[in-house]
Image (spheres, coloured by chain):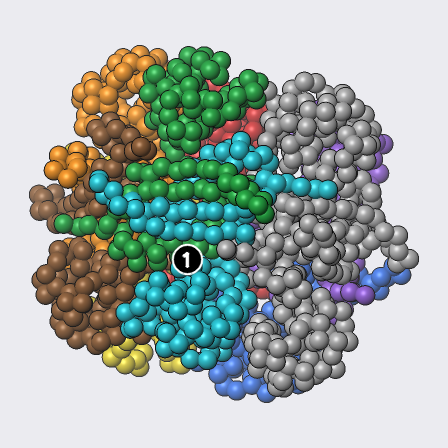
Chain colours: A brown, B orange, C green, D cyan, G yellow, H red, I purple, J blue
Amino acid sequence: MLTKSDAAEAVRAAKVRGKLTWVAVANAVGRPVAWTTAALLGQHPMSKEEAEAAAALLGLDRDAVEAFQLQPTRGVESPSVPSDPTIYRLHEVVQVYGPTIKELIHEECGDGIMSAINFRLNVERVPHLEGDRVVVTLDGKFLPYQWE
Amino acid sequence: MLTKSDAAEAVRAAKVRGKLTWVAVANAVGRPVAWTTAALLGQHPMSKEEAEAAAALLGLDRDAVEAFQLQPTRGVESPSVPSDPTIYRLHEVVQVYGPTIKELIHEECGDGIMSAINFRLNVERVPHLEGDRVVVTLDGKFLPYQWE
Amino acid sequence: MLTKSDAAEAVRAAKVRGKLTWVAVANAVGRPVAWTTAALLGQHPMSKEEAEAAAALLGLDRDAVEAFQLQPTRGVESPSVPSDPTIYRLHEVVQVYGPTIKELIHEECGDGIMSAINFRLNVERVPHLEGDRVVVTLDGKFLPYQWE
Amino acid sequence: MLTKSDAAEAVRAAKVRGKLTWVAVANAVGRPVAWTTAALLGQHPMSKEEAEAAAALLGLDRDAVEAFQLQPTRGVESPSVPSDPTIYRLHEVVQVYGPTIKELIHEECGDGIMSAINFRLNVERVPHLEGDRVVVTLDGKFLPYQWE
Amino acid sequence: MLTKSDAAEAVRAAKVRGKLTWVAVANAVGRPVAWTTAALLGQHPMSKEEAEAAAALLGLDRDAVEAFQLQPTRGVESPSVPSDPTIYRLHEVVQVYGPTIKELIHEECGDGIMSAINFRLNVERVPHLEGDRVVVTLDGKFLPYQWE
Amino acid sequence: MLTKSDAAEAVRAAKVRGKLTWVAVANAVGRPVAWTTAALLGQHPMSKEEAEAAAALLGLDRDAVEAFQLQPTRGVESPSVPSDPTIYRLHEVVQVYGPTIKELIHEECGDGIMSAINFRLNVERVPHLEGDRVVVTLDGKFLPYQWE
Amino acid sequence: MLTKSDAAEAVRAAKVRGKLTWVAVANAVGRPVAWTTAALLGQHPMSKEEAEAAAALLGLDRDAVEAFQLQPTRGVESPSVPSDPTIYRLHEVVQVYGPTIKELIHEECGDGIMSAINFRLNVERVPHLEGDRVVVTLDGKFLPYQWE
Amino acid sequence: MLTKSDAAEAVRAAKVRGKLTWVAVANAVGRPVAWTTAALLGQHPMSKEEAEAAAALLGLDRDAVEAFQLQPTRGVESPSVPSDPTIYRLHEVVQVYGPTIKELIHEECGDGIMSAINFRLNVERVPHLEGDRVVVTLDGKFLPYQWE
Amino acid sequence: MLTKSDAAEAVRAAKVRGKLTWVAVANAVGRPVAWTTAALLGQHPMSKEEAEAAAALLGLDRDAVEAFQLQPTRGVESPSVPSDPTIYRLHEVVQVYGPTIKELIHEECGDGIMSAINFRLNVERVPHLEGDRVVVTLDGKFLPYQWE
Amino acid sequence: MLTKSDAAEAVRAAKVRGKLTWVAVANAVGRPVAWTTAALLGQHPMSKEEAEAAAALLGLDRDAVEAFQLQPTRGVESPSVPSDPTIYRLHEVVQVYGPTIKELIHEECGDGIMSAINFRLNVERVPHLEGDRVVVTLDGKFLPYQWE
């Protein structure tokens, strides 16, 4: 049996061999591209149909189909400060602007959080005269602290 | 002389006393609300005019005006995993979806990063039938790896 | 102005001087005892009325009333492994039984979490022939992973 | 010979293949479901009979039967702050409410701890109009500090 | 009001000034010497009578009497590997012989722990021809894992 | 060739298969039980005779005989705070009572340490009306700080 | 399939066997020597042509050619303080002179950073009478903090 | 008496009040600008003359003159991964390119290091059509491993 | 009352004011220079006579005399990897040559350690044609592992 | 191909099998014993001749000969506080006496360090009436801070 993390390695390899994009895989699976990417990197469980559609396009076998359906243990195993520069910039945003986002959530919505579970994200390239921009949208339900 | 972090404490206190919002302070300063919040929390230097406008509204003195203009040492001093639940959810997003965002940036833009320097952010409450949502937009210039 | 953590110290001192219990303070405030204890230890903001009722009973002044109303930065500043034996046993439960609780949540409810925001807790002493027991009840809304 | 952690992996795989639930396994073993889940995840030693009943239902061999009987080294090997969101919420409860639970234990029972050894836990789904809830009950013997 | 840790500092200073030993203080308090030392270093709460007896001998005031009675948050704030050589040797014993002690507890008593709560300790100098020895006795109740 | 840590795994497995106790192994080896346990868990080198006696009883081969004789790199590789509850209680004793033991060593013997090298330990079950007790005796030579 | 880190090991081995220098490999690849070294150590993706040229000179197979083209996860997995003395000296420079470099960047260019993405580096041996010197040049685009 | 770190704070404040640049201070002191900046930030001891020249220009008193002459304990007290983005980029360079620099030092000079003691650094703004660049030059003596 | 660490700061200041060397202080105290330096930096307790001799030469008061006599909690509070380059080189020696020293101690003396308690050290400047050398001598009693 | 660390394991095994000492290996290699030990433990590269002499005596093959010649990445991979008691005592010396050694280096030689690169070490057993001693000599070139 394949672990979800081994399956993610196999997906990356298959994408390179098949010259496939995440968009193409997401279309085959029939889910949004960010969700599909996260699922195949091991962060979401897939249904049987989704797992089979992904494996068919990527040319992977039954073990991968099973691994895609497993309940994940989410998150990363590496140290809490990521060293990859692309991921680190997101960490830097939390360090530099985290308290700012907290203040603005409390000002607009009261005491509570933006859910990371009832949550979706989008990554887009936006053309710009002085150089294109990356726009990452984090969109989560507001959950107020609620005791009784 | 006041440090930027002491000045941030004074701002929080003054907001409570004056029943002011970040939006009101940003209007007085004439800059976007997220930038203004970040700056007064000690993450950006202000111009003399901006610092004076903020201090006037908040009822703070010359020391605060000078502190608002100081070049910051950015980031937080606390441990790399934040314990406040509102800020932790952002950290969780980076842990769970960081590799997904990295994959999608590379797929759409090639090898490079979303700048956290040529960067702006927005926090918005979006009404929704099943409960309002918080939408955080991270908008940074794409910087390709470029050697020569 | 008093920080929430200074205010918590003042509460502990006032309780010793006044020989008060958390139950008595909660009755004065009109909220559940666990919520009231957490709020006065700096983990929840109080309304003006709640803050005044608590301060009146504890013999604390206006600064404490203001501090009780401040939006908290939640959690602890100390290292992630608590050294106090009473708190450590809770940490040990998460270490030894965390994956078990995760398995059972997924088996009974599907992919998702027990909310720690829409959440209440109760601590009770339960008499028992072989020695009384402490029963801690964690009661949070189930939040399913939900993307679209 | 199989380690307890290898055996736990084999159990997860066998459950997926056999479409079995923890409840079904616990019934075969004849112990409470939370205890059985913890034991098969490697946190408790089983008796020979319990180990054989579990292995029979799961279709595992003699090595697994022996591994289930081994004395465990309990706890997790991963960093002290769990990254999986379902487990992290339990960690967050200890961070945010740990000192509250400590205060209430001391108020109700005096100086001592809730045992994590003479201890049982229960996880239940409780229907609720605004969304079902997860209720986790931690139930441990009170142990007073006792020197002589 | 004095914290328990400030009170401990005051005790050390008073011992030096008054040329007192822990044995003498324990006699005045009427409790074993190791318990008394631990209590005055901030690890146990004292009764009003014990606190007053200790303060009288040490020449300390009402604040110390109150601090001695406070419920402690036990343990140390410093990093988990102690740097003081006298304390480090105890840490080394746990590192080198911890698994040995675990094996022998399980062999003699079954699955469970030596309690650190229902626990007493003794430190003694034992004369020996090749150089005197220090004998530290850790004496705790055996607590078997017990679920139902 | 077998490492000392592989050899320790083999010893545990052989004990389960042969239903042997540490006491029986120590008798075959002709050394105290705690020393023998520590040595076979990889913390002491054995003589050729001791290694052969142990291997004969446990049914292990030449590689194990050689591994038992190797000079060990002592201690554990895992993080400095042990997560196994049986071992953690020893760690807790050092955290809660370490400074107390240090004070009493200095009071009785002067400036110095209890050696962890010229050292022996004993673990005993002591019957008791309210529940049997575990008594761990740490017995090390006192080493005074000595410069010239 | 080969990971980028396995491929880097293969490159080191091939260099030793073929008595090749990084300069020679860079010439074959047609890129600067520092870029080529970094790329083959797994820090940059290569084009198909570059990967094939490198593999041909080093005598490596198709798997290496594919690995050289993979998008890297950059940085190191080891702890944040490097133990190798040659690399540690660079870390020491950041510790001792980091704030100095920050001050001078801000004095000469205003609020912003030296990019590590639009960046090149050079390492040179410079002859000197009292012993040759190593000159490392870090050359990155200045990126001003820019919000709107 | 002033510590070197308090003196550094006083220097920063004096620079803001006096609208002075590091270049101006270095000219007054008669040393290179990077050395002078590092020295006044507490990383090098100054001679009496240098200390007096700096204090005169900055309007600081005798205590500062003495602090500037003290032997420093070099480096930073903060965690090993800096959170300020300007300093972090230098840390990122060591993480991403450290092994590359090591390889090139060994290829050009043999087994050894670039000294960080017999060392100087320079920071320069270099005009460029596509945006000015920051060039940081690290220039240290090569020290070969040398045993006999 | 002065802590040992405050007293060490006072000693450093007094040395600068009085233009005294550690050798001069050691002569006044009548002990070796390395011992005296360590003691005044807070790592050894002094006798009353030694403390008074040191304080007299350094021009320090009664509080310092008492602090010099206090039993120390030895070691450093800073992180385990020192950032000061002079101290780091000693740490580097332990990292690079620690296992070598261990091998040679075991080869020459058998299983045991070099005591750091029955221990003295010496630091000397040794003239050399190619540049003077620093020779640090660590001289400790060999302690064999000894159980019975 | 063998890594340097695999080769070190092979050396240890070969020494046990051949009943060889480090002195004997060093004689065969023709270098000092401490250097030879360090080199074979993976901390120095050997010349082809040295590598072949060592392999011949130890009965190792061509792969080991190549591994001995590889440029090492120095230091240890384990946590920064060593748990082996023999190595820990060296770490303790740096913790307890590091600042003392720093003071004495600065007093005798001025601002600078003892090189750990232009460095040799010696380990010797010195007979003594009260028990033999281990003398470790660290002998490194003094490197003054030198900017221009």
Q: Which residue is mark 1?
A: D34
Q: Residue at x 37, y 32 (%)?
A: C73
Q: Residue furthest front?
A: C129
x 46%, y 78%: residue: D63
- Left or right: residue D119 versus residue A72 is right
Q: Give the residue type that dot 1 points to.
A: Ala
Residue B106 sits in which quadrant?
A: bottom left
Query: Looking at the picture, how far across and down is residue G108, in whole percent?
Result: 31, 35
Q: Secondary structure at mark 1?
A: helix
H114 vs G147, left or right, is right
Between residues A48 and G43, which one lies in front from this camera angle? A48
Left or right: D10 with respect to I97? Answer: left
Classify A104 as above or below J19. above
Q: Is residue I20 left or right of residue D68?
A: right
User: Is C45 situated above or below I82?
Assistant: above
Question: Looking at the rendering, in which quadrant would you find the N terminus of chain H?
Answer: top right
Relative to J103, is C10 above or below? Answer: above
Residue A63 shows in the view: yes
Residue A10 place in picture, x, y as percent? 25, 71
| Residue J89 locus on image (x, y percent) | 68, 56
Quarter holding the C terminus of chain H is: bottom right
Residue J19 visible at all = no
Residue at image position (53%, 77%) is J7
Give the residue displayed 59% in from the left and 47% down from the top: C130
Residue J33, quarter of the rendered image: bottom right
For mark 1, name the chain: D
